[in-house]
Image (cartoon, helix red, strand yellow):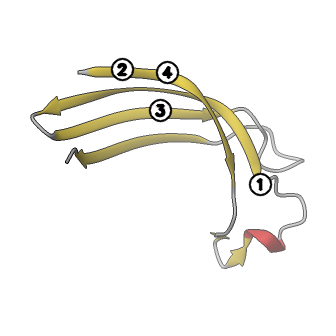
Amino acid sequence: MDGRIGGFFSVDMAGKLGDVKIADLDDYRRCDGGLLIGIGLWYQNINLDFAYQRGFANRFEDIDGGASNFLIRLGYAF
Protein backbone atom coordinates (compact mmCIF):
# COMPACT_ATOMS: atom_id res chain seq x y z
CA MET A 1 0.00 0.00 0.00
CA ASP A 2 1.30 3.47 -0.79
CA GLY A 3 -0.11 6.97 -0.42
CA ARG A 4 0.44 10.23 -2.20
CA ILE A 5 -0.34 13.89 -1.74
CA GLY A 6 0.93 16.73 -3.86
CA GLY A 7 0.25 19.57 -6.22
CA PHE A 8 -0.33 19.65 -9.95
CA PHE A 9 -0.47 22.10 -12.85
CA SER A 10 -2.42 21.30 -16.01
CA VAL A 11 -3.06 22.89 -19.40
CA ASP A 12 -5.91 21.85 -21.72
CA MET A 13 -4.33 21.46 -25.14
CA ALA A 14 -7.28 20.09 -27.11
CA GLY A 15 -10.73 18.74 -26.50
CA LYS A 16 -14.42 19.43 -26.78
CA LEU A 17 -17.20 20.68 -24.54
CA GLY A 18 -20.16 18.97 -26.17
CA ASP A 19 -19.87 19.70 -29.90
CA VAL A 20 -17.75 22.86 -29.44
CA LYS A 21 -13.93 22.80 -29.44
CA ILE A 22 -12.50 24.39 -26.28
CA ALA A 23 -10.23 26.55 -28.47
CA ASP A 24 -13.40 28.27 -29.77
CA LEU A 25 -14.68 29.25 -26.30
CA ASP A 26 -13.93 32.88 -25.42
CA ASP A 27 -14.06 32.78 -21.61
CA TYR A 28 -12.67 29.26 -21.01
CA ARG A 29 -9.51 29.13 -18.89
CA ARG A 30 -7.15 26.41 -20.07
CA CYS A 31 -4.70 26.45 -17.11
CA ASP A 32 -5.40 24.98 -13.69
CA GLY A 33 -3.50 24.00 -10.57
CA GLY A 34 -4.50 22.23 -7.41
CA LEU A 35 -4.01 19.32 -5.04
CA LEU A 36 -4.05 15.55 -5.49
CA ILE A 37 -4.45 12.96 -2.76
CA GLY A 38 -4.60 9.21 -3.26
CA ILE A 39 -3.77 5.68 -2.23
CA GLY A 40 -2.44 2.74 -4.21
CA LEU A 41 -2.67 -0.98 -3.58
CA TRP A 42 0.01 -3.37 -4.84
CA TYR A 43 -0.19 -7.12 -5.47
CA GLN A 44 3.13 -8.37 -6.85
CA ASN A 45 3.60 -6.23 -10.02
CA ILE A 46 -0.02 -5.05 -10.32
CA ASN A 47 -1.07 -1.65 -8.95
CA LEU A 48 -4.60 -0.37 -8.34
CA ASP A 49 -4.63 3.35 -7.60
CA PHE A 50 -7.42 5.62 -6.33
CA ALA A 51 -6.96 9.40 -6.25
CA TYR A 52 -8.92 12.63 -5.91
CA GLN A 53 -7.82 15.74 -7.79
CA ARG A 54 -9.16 19.22 -6.97
CA GLY A 55 -8.34 22.27 -9.10
CA PHE A 56 -8.44 25.81 -7.71
CA ALA A 57 -8.93 27.86 -10.89
CA ASN A 58 -12.40 28.73 -12.18
CA ARG A 59 -12.91 27.06 -15.57
CA PHE A 60 -14.99 29.98 -16.88
CA GLU A 61 -14.72 33.67 -15.96
CA ASP A 62 -18.37 34.05 -14.90
CA ILE A 63 -18.85 30.64 -13.16
CA ASP A 64 -17.28 29.84 -9.77
CA GLY A 65 -15.75 26.44 -9.12
CA GLY A 66 -12.75 24.48 -10.27
CA ALA A 67 -12.27 21.04 -11.76
CA SER A 68 -12.86 18.04 -9.51
CA ASN A 69 -11.84 14.53 -10.59
CA PHE A 70 -11.82 11.06 -9.09
CA LEU A 71 -9.23 8.81 -10.73
CA ILE A 72 -8.97 5.02 -10.85
CA ARG A 73 -5.85 3.57 -12.45
CA LEU A 74 -4.73 0.01 -13.06
CA GLY A 75 -1.04 -0.50 -13.78
CA TYR A 76 1.61 -3.13 -14.18
CA ALA A 77 5.29 -2.69 -13.21
CA PHE A 78 7.74 -4.40 -15.58
Query: In the rendering, at what x and y percent does residue 13 appear?
Result: 69, 64
1 and 3 marks in contact (CB < 8 Å): no
The image quarter containing residue 24 is: bottom right
| N-terminal-most mark, 1 or 2 | 2
Residue at 82% in and 45% down: 63
Determine the residue located farthest toward the left in the rendered image.
Answer: 44
| Residue matched to label 3 | 52
Q: In the shown orientation, is residue 13 left or right of residue 6?
A: right
- Answer left or right for 19 relative to 73: right
Q: Could you tell me residue 53's position as x and y percent?
A: 53, 34
Residue at image point 72% right, 32% down: 56
- The 10 Å Cα crowd at callout 1, few under 14, some 14 to 19, many 20 or more, is some
* Disc 3 secondary structure class: strand
Is label 4 in a helix, a strand or a loop? strand
Residue 3, label in figure:
2
Tell me whether the residue at label 4 lies in contact with that at label 2, contact meaning CB atoms closer than 8 angstroms. Answer: yes
The amino acid on which the numbered mark 2 sits, given as a three-letter code, is: Gly
Q: Which residue is mark 1?
A: 30
Amino acid type assigned to the residue bearing label 1 in the image: Arg
- First in residue order: circle 3 vs circle 2: 2
The answer to whether residue 25 is above or below residue 57 is below
Residue 10, relative to residue 16: is it above or below? above
Q: CA distance from mark 4 to mark 2?
A: 7 Å
List the single residue furthest toward the front: 78
Quadrant containing the N terminus is top left
Q: CA distance from mark 3 to mark 2?
A: 12 Å
As measured in the structure, the alpha-carbon distance from the residue carrying label 1 to the one carrying label 2 is: 29 Å
Instruction: Look at discs 1 and 2 and give the one toward the viewer.
Output: 2
